[in-house]
């Protein structure tokens, strides 16, 4: 991460949701994710910022925090960045403090804590457009004077207003090196801080800054002591003595810091903000509706239903077009490759059949992310957490778990990262453990395929969407008891506080929402072009080879009266069956037999261990290779509808009976087949133990529940 | 003197005391909720818990159980103008 030492390092610090990432994007020209929810950025990201005079600095975007007394892992990132505690990283040379212009007092608390670091500071009052709308007028010159002469800049980062001034202010701060005015401690607190600094320095042999001394004295968090290497037994006594000294002067040591800071900030802010005539925002009014006792939950359900309905219905048309496009390409390409049967099979059955079957789901992915983006940027996400908290608290999670869980419906990986906003490590672990249960977009393809091929045609579109919604609930239904067992019995999590700021509502910004959707779509498509493509070819090859000519000859000899076409089809099927994949699938199939999976499905299940979506492309290969002779006519649905058990007790009955279709969907709803998720889980929980636990739990659960579904339904139908 | 959890939606109160040793209260203090501060219970969530409270021009959620230890004075006249609602 480190850059040439010549470059200066500047950190963006501020409360959550003030617009740091938006400002970062404006200053660096990069595109960091932004959103109207406290805790969008959870790790540090850096970029290069031009100061306008040719000078370049490295700018770091950090998670938001309210106080340096860090409680959650994302806040700790900021403390570490400011103290140069991240491996291979330096301390910043300056800090851009981003504050919300509509709430200076609260935002400046963090600023005056940061002032203790003594670094050059630029104070950016962001969201000036909102402040102006509310009729607030801020005297920046007066504020600058009160705060020790640091540059103070009013910006609307989102509109790009005031950005050149920030660059200039930063250049100014770096050359003049003006720190923010520090708080003046009452004599006894100052004395206690000096005692702590002295004791720590004596014990550790390190230099202990005044900022360090404050963290040591005021916080229950021990990260500073750990960084300095000040052990518990050595620090216990001097810290107790210093805290007693503070207490004897009339301050509770745990409350002294905010009390002193806020009192002095009130004085510093006196006369800085004048309230003119402004529009009262609509937030309170909208909340009266959206958080209403009765209407609130109704609207919540409505929004969630609308969410799923639009994903299914709206996406239908573009999906059909893509399918048509794939079929058309197949129809054009396949005949021209007739002279080269192997290449023909590779292109038509392998690549187009596999990757095509996967790409069809692009429209649904787009709508899914569009929706989540709108929910987040409008400010509704925090309200959803507020409404849902009660339902989560009984199982040891909290409303903050809701956001990772909801976005888990899109993809588990960013959701696992967003669990970093949860303070308690155990609650965080429990949330991370259940996030992969949420029905992510990678499960979508298999549900959609099964519903469109079987549920829809047999029971009508009503049932089709009901089953779709139902499948999305399966994960949730099992996640909640799992969380309960985990938090109550295994981890024994203490009840969690739920202090979440409810941001003001705003019109979702199309630019941000579309950007986010676009990024995710690009990721999806590039996955189709890389991972899925590679697995598809491997699966195709395993199901194409070995290809001994004797097989075809034997078939021809056995069916002398049949047409050439028919013999060819039979031969294809025979080839697949004796291919490597066929043999392997048949060997493993008994494990999945109680679930009603034939060997082709078994192959799909096995092939999709790296990524769930692969099931669809694998079925695309295994089922169309057998039919493949007339490549233009058969699509995957038809091939599956016609598939029958060739032998055994179920011979002649359809493989994809209602029981098997449901069992297959349930299996994929619960299984843990996603390599990246497991890797992320290991990374976020600090070891492979939990990742392995998650894999075993989910796979076992998937097998058992899916088996139960199959066995029950097969007996009922 | 009443626990914050017993305020009615829409009611104002002046914070009399909190427990600085608790993590939740430390968070609230960082947000500016200090003794003497006027706050308002805006509403309870549809299921009765958590609460939404307003102080220092911001709306923050808080669980009922956590609000029990926050003691507010509802009889004190609340001289501070109604906190700004963005
Ligand atoms: N009206 C207005 N909205 C802004 C402005 N700057 C940012 N926003 C919005 O404020 C919200 C938060 O912006 P982010 O850039 O994600 O904030 P952040 O400080 O990085 O937030 P965290 O990463 O959660 O700490 C987004 O919805 C932005 O669109 C601004 O100048 N004016
Ligand atoms: Mg951010």
Image (spheres, helix red, strand yellow):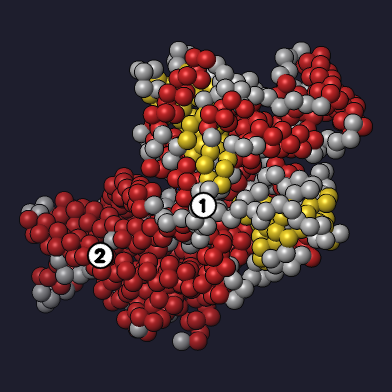
Residue A168's quadrant in the figure? top left
Label 1 C-beta lies within 8 Å of the nearest ligand 1 atom:
no
Q: CA distance from mark 1 to mark 2?
A: 49 Å
Q: Which mark is residue A318?
A: 2
Residue that appears at 52% across and 42% down: A137
- Element marked by disc 1: loop
Q: Which mark is residue A277?
A: 1
Nearer to me, A168 or A133: A133
Residue that appears at 67% across and 53% down: B81
- Element marked by disc 2: helix
Nearer to me, A402 or A701: A402
**In the picture provided, is A392 more to the left or to the right than A711?**
right
Which-is-in-front pick, marks 1 and 2? 1
Q: Number of marks in the image? A: 2
Nearer to me, B14 or A107: B14
**In the picture provided, is A653 more to the left or to the right than A80?**
left
**In the picture provided, is A631 more to the left or to the right than A83?**
left
- The chain carrying label 2 is A
Crowding at dot 2, Cα within 10 Å, few <14 / some 14-19 / many 20+, comes out as some
Residue A708's quadrant in the figure? bottom right
Label 2 C-beta lies within 8 Å of the nearest ligand 1 atom:
no
Residue B29's quadrant in the figure? top right
- Give the mark nearer the N terminus: 1 vs 2: 1
Residue that appears at 40% across and 72% down: A309
- The chain carrying label 1 is A
Are dots 1 and 2 on a single chain? yes
Nearer to me, A616 or A317: A317
């Amino acid at each position: 991460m480190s850059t040439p030492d010549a470059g200066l390092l500047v950190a963006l610090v501020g409360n959550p949701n003030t617009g740091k990432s938006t400002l970062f994007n404006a200053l660096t020209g990069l595109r960091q994710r932004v959103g109207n929810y406290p805790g969008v950025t959870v790790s540090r990201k850096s970029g290069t910022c031009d100061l306008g005079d040719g000078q370049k600095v490295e700018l770091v975007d950090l998670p938001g925090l309210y106080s340096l007394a860090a409680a959650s892992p994302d806040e700790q990132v900021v403390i570490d960045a400011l103290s140069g505690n991240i491996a291979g990283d330096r301390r910043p040379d300056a800090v851009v403090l981003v504050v919300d212009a509509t709430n200076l007092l609260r935002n400046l608390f963090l600023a005056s804590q940061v002032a203790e670091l003594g670094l050059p500071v630029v104070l950016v009052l962001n969201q000036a457009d909102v402040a102006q709308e509310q009729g607030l007028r801020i005297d920046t010159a007066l504020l600058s004077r009160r705060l020790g002469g640091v540059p103070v800049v009013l910006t609307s980062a989102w509109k790009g207003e005031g950005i050149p001034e920030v660059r200039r202010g930063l250049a100014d701060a770096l050359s003049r090196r003006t720190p923010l005015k520090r708080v003046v401690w009452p004599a006894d607190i100052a004395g206690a801080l000096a005692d702590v600094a002295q004791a720590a320095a004596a014990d550790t042999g390190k230099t202990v800054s005044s900022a360090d001394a404050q963290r040591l004295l005021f916080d229950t968090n021990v990260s500073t002591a750990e960084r300095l290497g000040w052990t518990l037994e050595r620090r216990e006594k001097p810290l107790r003595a210093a805290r007693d000294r503070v207490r004897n002067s009339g301050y509770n040591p745990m409350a002294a810091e905010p009390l002193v800071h806020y009192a002095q900030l009130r004085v510093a802010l006196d006369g800085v903000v004048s309230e003119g005539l402004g529009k009262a925002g609509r937030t309170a009014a909208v909340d009266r509706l959206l958080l209403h006792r009765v209407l609130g939950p109704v609207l919540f359900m409505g929004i969630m239903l609308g969410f799923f309905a639009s994903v299914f219905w709206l996406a239908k048309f573009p999906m059909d077009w893509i399918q048509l496009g794939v079929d058309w390409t197949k129809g054009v390409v396949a005949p021209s490759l007739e002279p080269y049967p192997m290449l023909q099979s590779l292109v038509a059955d392998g690549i187009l059949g596999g990757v095509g079957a996967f790409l069809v789901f692009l429209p649904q992915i787009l709508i899914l992310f569009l929706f989540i983006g709108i929910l987040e940027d409008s400010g509704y996400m925090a309200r959803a957490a507020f409404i849902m908290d009660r339902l989560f608290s009984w199982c040891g999670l909290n409303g903050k778990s809701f956001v990772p869980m909801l976005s888990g419906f899109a993809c588990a990986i960013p959701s696992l990262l967003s669990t970093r906003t949860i303070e308690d490590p155990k609650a965080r672990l429990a949330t991370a453990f259940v996030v992969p249960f949420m029905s992510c977009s990678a499960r979508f393809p298999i549900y959609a395929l099964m519903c469109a091929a079987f549920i829809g045609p047999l029971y009508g579109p009503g049932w089709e969407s009901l089953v779709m919604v139902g499948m999305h609930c399966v994960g949730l239904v099992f996640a909640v008891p799992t969380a309960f067992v985990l938090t109550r019995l295994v981890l024994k999590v203490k009840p969690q506080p739920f202090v979440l700021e409810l941001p003001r509502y705003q019109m979702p910004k199309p630019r941000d929402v579309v950007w986010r959707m676009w990024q995710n779509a690009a990721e999806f498509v590039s996955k189709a072009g890389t991972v899925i493509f590679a697995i598809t070819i491997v699966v195709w090859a395993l199901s194409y080879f070995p290809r001994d000519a004797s097989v075809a000859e034997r078939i021809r000899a056995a069916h002398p009266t049949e047409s050439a076409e028919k013999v060819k089809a039979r031969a294809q099927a025979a080839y697949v069956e004796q291919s490597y994949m066929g043999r392997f699938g048949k060997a493993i199939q008994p494990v999945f037999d109680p679930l009603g999976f034939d060997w082709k499905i078994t192959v799909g299940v096995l092939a999709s261990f790296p990524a769930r979506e692969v099931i669809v492309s694998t079925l695309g290969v295994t089922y169309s290779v057998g039919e493949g002779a007339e490549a233009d006519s058969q699509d995957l649905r038809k091939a599956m509808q016609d598939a029958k058990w060739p032998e055994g007790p179920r011979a002649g009955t359809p493989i994809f009976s209602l029981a098997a279709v449901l069992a297959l969907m349930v299996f994929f709803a619960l299984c843990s087949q996603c390599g990246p998720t497991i890797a992320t889980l290991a990374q976020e929980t600090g070891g492979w133990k939990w990742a392995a636990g998650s894999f075993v739990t989910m796979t076992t659960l998937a097998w058992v529940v899916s088996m139960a579904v199959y066995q029950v339904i097969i007996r009922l139908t | 003197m009443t626990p914050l959890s017993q305020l009615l939606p829409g009611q104002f109160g002046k914070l009399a005391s909190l427990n600085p040793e608790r993590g939740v209260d430390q968070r609230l203090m960082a947000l500016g909720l200090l003794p003497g501060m006027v706050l308002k219970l805006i509403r309870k969530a549809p299921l009765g818990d958590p609460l939404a409270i307003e102080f220092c021009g911001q709306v923050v959620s808080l669980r009922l159980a956590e609000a029990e230890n926050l003691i507010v004075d509802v009889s004190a006249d609340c001289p501070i103008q109604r906190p700004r609602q963005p």
